[in-house]
C-alpha cells in the first residue's frame, strides 16, 4: 500500500493536509482554506489526470452558479453565512495538459434551506473532509464555443 502525507499552509491562515492511500487521496481542509484552490493544488502535486471527488464539511463564504442555457453563461449566487456542505461532488480531468477540477456543491443553511450549483469558490468555516478517487487513464476537456462550456472529449 502506497501511503504518504503532505501538508501545506494556506496564505490566509488555513491549513490543508492530505494522505494518499493507493488510489484514494483523503484531504482535510481547515478554517480559511478554499476548496477549489486546495483541490487544484493537490491534483497538480499528485499529477492527477482522472478522478472523482466527494466530500462534506462547512463553509461560510461561497459562490455557486447555475448555467443559463439562453445566455450560455452562469448566474452567480454568493452566500456569506454558515452552511453545512451536504454534498461536494465532481471530477478531476485535464485541460491544456493541466489538472482541471470541476465541482458541484449542495449546502444547507441555518433553517435547513438547501442551495447549490456549480462551485466557483468556497472558504471553509470549520473543516472539510474530501476524497479524491483516482482512476487509470485520462480525460481531456475542450472548449465547446457553441455551448460555452469545457466538455470532456474522448478524441
Image (cartoon, rainbow, N blue to C red):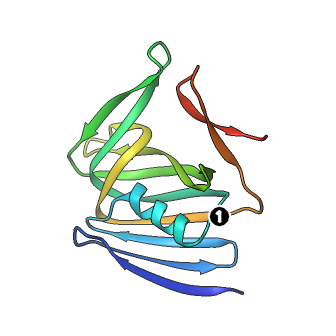
Give the mark count.
Answer: 1
Which quadrant holds the N terminus?
A: bottom right
Residue drawn at point x = 55 percent, y = 31 percent: 149
**Residue found 77% across the figure and 63% down from its top:** 136
Crowding at dot 1, Cα within 10 Å, few <14 / some 14-19 / many 20+, comes out as some
Say if 83 sits above or below 150 in the image. below
Residue 71: x and y in percent read 44, 16
The residue pinned by badge 1 equals 133
Determine whether, in the image, residue 11 is placed left or right of residue 44: left
Place residue 35 in its image quadrant. Answer: bottom left
State the image coordinates of residue 26 (x, y, percent, origin top left): 54, 72
Q: x, y percentage for residue 128?
A: 40, 64
Q: Nearer the viewer, residue 41 or 122?
A: 41
Q: Quadrant of the C terminus?
A: top right
Residue at position x 63%, y 38% in the image: 142
What is the quadrant of residue 73 in the picture?
top left
Q: Residue at x 37, y 38 (%)?
A: 64
Location of residue 15 with respect to 50 vertically, above or below:
below
Label 1's element? strand
Most foreground residue, 98 or 23: 98
Front one among 78 and 115? 78
Q: Is residue 57 above or below residue 143?
A: below
Depth check: give the residue in front, 31 or 107. 31
- Identify whether 60 is placed above or below 133: above
Residue farthest to the top, as pictured: 70
Amino acid at each position: 500500500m502506497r501511503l504518504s502525507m503532505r501538508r501545506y499552509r494556506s496564505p490566509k491562515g488555513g491549513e490543508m493536509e492530505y494522505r494518499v492511500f493507493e488510489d484514494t487521496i483523503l484531504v482535510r481542509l481547515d478554517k480559511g482554506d478554499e476548496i477549489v484552490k486546495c483541490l487544484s493544488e493537490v491534483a497538480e502535486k499528485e499529477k492527477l489526470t482522472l478522478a472523482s471527488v466527494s466530500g462534506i464539511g462547512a463553509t461560510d463564504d461561497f459562490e455557486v452558479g447555475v448555467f443559463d442555457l439562453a445566455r450560455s453563461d452562469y448566474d452567480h449566487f454568493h452566500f456569506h453565512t454558515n452552511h453545512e456542505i451536504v454534498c461536494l461532488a465532481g471530477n478531476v480531468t485535464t485541460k491544456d495538459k493541466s489538472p482541471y477540477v470541476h465541482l458541484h456543491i449542495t449546502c444547507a443553511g441555518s433553517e435547513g434551506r438547501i442551495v447549490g450549483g456549480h462551485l466557483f469558490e468556497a472558504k471553509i468555516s470549520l473543516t472539510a473532509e474530501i476524497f479524491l478517487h483516482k482512476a487509470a487513464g485520462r480525460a481531456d476537456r475542450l472548449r465547446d464555443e457553441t455551448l460555452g462550456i469545457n466538455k470532456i472529449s474522448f478524441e
